[in-house]
Image: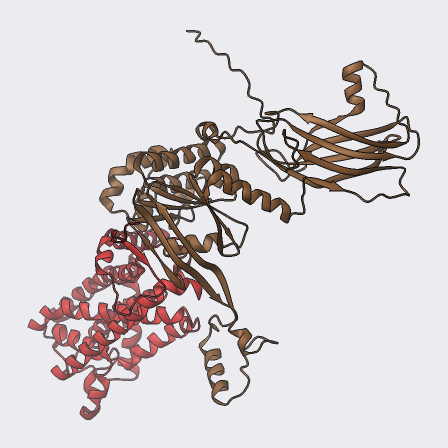
Chain colours: A brown, B red
Amino acid sequence: MSIALRIENLSKEYRLGLIGHGTLYRDLQSFWARILNKEDPNTLIGTNKSKVKGKFLALKNINLEINKGEVLGIIGANGAGKSTLLKIISRVTTPSVGSIKASGKISSLLEIGTGFHFELTGRENIFLNGAINGMSKKEVSKKLDEIVDFAGVETFLDTPVKRYSSGMHVRLGFAVAAHLEPDILVVDEVLAVGDAAFQKKAINKMESVSKDSGRTILFVSHNMEAVRKFCTKTMLLKEGKLTNFGDTNEIVNHYLRGFNVQNNSTSEIFYKKDHNKTFQILRMSIMNHKRANTTLIDRKYPFILSFDYKVLKYADSLQANIAITTHGPQNAVQDDTVVLQWSEQHYNKYKFNNQEVKKDKGVYRVEIDVPGYLLNSGTYKFSVALVYGGSNYEVKKDNIIFNLFDSDSSHALKTGRSAGVLGLPLNWKENKLN
Amino acid sequence: MNEDQKWDIHIKPKIGWFEIDIKELFNYKDLIWLFVKRDFVTFYKQTILGPLWYIIQPLINTIVFTIIFGNLAKISTDGVSPFIFYMSGTVAWSYFASCITLTSNTFSNNAAIFGKVYFPRITVPIANVIISLLQFSIQFTIFIFFLIYFKYNGSLIYPNKYILLLPLIILQMAILGLGFGILISSLTTKYKDLTFVMSFFVQLWMYASPVVYPLSIIPEKYRIIAALNPMTSIIETFRGAFLGVSSIQLTHILISVSFTLLIFFIGLLLFNRIEKSFMDTI
């Protein structure tokens, strides 16, 4: 298999402090000060010369080879160097050390609709945008119908773009980009625009581009689901260094795990005993179906939520509640929305039609099995509340954050994640009526 | 893997001073035309009078010069009717001035798009020079109308065979305007102040060139100094061809052409260096 892109010893350095003084006057001032051996009036206060020459390495010695037809996901936290890498590959800026060699044409989609002029019509903008991205007039003409059709702007083709809705604007921009036919396409999170239907269309288009025509795609995203669905290989950047490269699922899982540790989110947490509290939560944990503590759960399998609590005196109205809530807004569901709540009272009522619960003094352990496929892929929180006499006695939330993912990515690849927080596969009975 | 694979694109830290990719520029020729079209169409769409501005501007300049320098200051016009004398200077000068002004803002005006997508940056200044040419041709047509009018009203003007030099004069102005413009635009990425100095500087340069006066009022021994300004020979040749009055000599022209080429190459080399990395400094 031939190589589409080879990155060799690539580093990008930004100089701190010394970046152009900006005005000729100040440069002359600095120059004059140096001649007179005086202190440079433009040096930042409290810095000495060696500090002024401080460097910031946005990328550190990256080496990578990407084969033709590969879809490479680039992931990492903010500031890890993803955008810098894309900028260098798209030739917007240069590396400081090292080089990149590529075979074929590179086009980048760092922003949709770059170079659109609001006064020009849709048609004029298609040609302009195409040309900016390196297409000739002839190539654009050949693709014009396809582009217009894809964007769905036939009726507005000769209307100035300033009259377009923002959605049309984005669709037109993506349509041109999707028909560029470069050998290497660089995409930066552009799929995060447009409505759900268009996003799907965009993903399908990119998939077909990479599969049918063997183009290489570099895809930067914070959307792990999209990376999982779409990328054949993934690289993980951390503080400018390439820390992992390989199979997408493996790298994404590794990244998410690291992410959770960073957030002080663990799969098991113990609380110090407090003798002033009559009732107290002592431990919370989450386990996968193999009873291993983890916050990364394949949603195909059941998982176990567990907690311990202590009771110092007999109680007949103590209620221990668990809840699963969403973590961060996702798929039209707001942050911290309760997805499900359950308690011993609820269980007794359901099982024995009797919701009375009496607790003797002691320490109790609760385990709740959550069936597989119940919840959709996403990030959730596990919280526990002790309710006594009708009001919250103690609440523990935000400490256990867990991820449900679809391991069956080949299946998800075709359909994409369905919206919503529930993920039960439902039967679909359909008959042709006429 | 295979080491001798052929690479089409090689991205590296710095490129050599003389690594100018003409072939790539040629691939982007459609882009140049689309930029020209874009600027022309948008200019036309955004103003009520549209291209009429191209006519009004030199006419007003000419009238002002005629009143101030011709009637009040009574500066010599080599015996030519002042109106047509000033008009010839204004029309030629405004092409050059427009090339410089548009081109010198290349990086600052296009920072947003340059930061998102790669294409040879030189396409923008080239498009500017061409769009200025459109403006020039409209103004030049008006100038020709006046020239014919003055000729038939007995003015002492003698259009001659040197008119054939016009394409070369325009070419030289284009190269000079482009070269100087990209030189300034490269410097403005580091020194933003230059943007403000530019309009002032272009004005000064005009008075240093024989636009509102003929070269003949400069004593003969100093003319060689005036000829160091490439625009001197350009405007004098232009006037010599259309009005038949000029004090230009071949040496002046040769100096002018050499300076033009020198400025162009310095500008091109600097621009070529800056265009790859300016995103980090702007």
- View extreme (left): residue: B161
**Left or right for A349, reference B267:** right
- View extreme (top): residue: A434
The residue lying at 84 percent from left, 43 percent from top is A273
The residue lying at 45 percent from left, 29 percent from top is A410
Q: Quadrant of residue A69?
A: top left
Quadrant where the image shows the C terminus of chain B: bottom left
Camera-side residue of A1 and B118: A1
* Residue B200 vertical placement versus A2 (above, below): below
Q: Is residue A193 visible?
A: no
Q: Is residue A408 visible?
A: yes
* Residue A55 vertical placement versus A267 (above, below): below
Image coords of residue A49 (percent x, y)? 54, 78
* Residue A250 vertical placement versus B211 (above, below): above
The residue lying at 49 percent from left, 72 percent from top is A18
Image coords of residue B114 (percent x, y)? 38, 57
**Left or right for A216, reference A60:** left
Q: Quadrant of residue B201?
A: bottom left
Image coords of residue A5 (percent x, y)? 34, 50
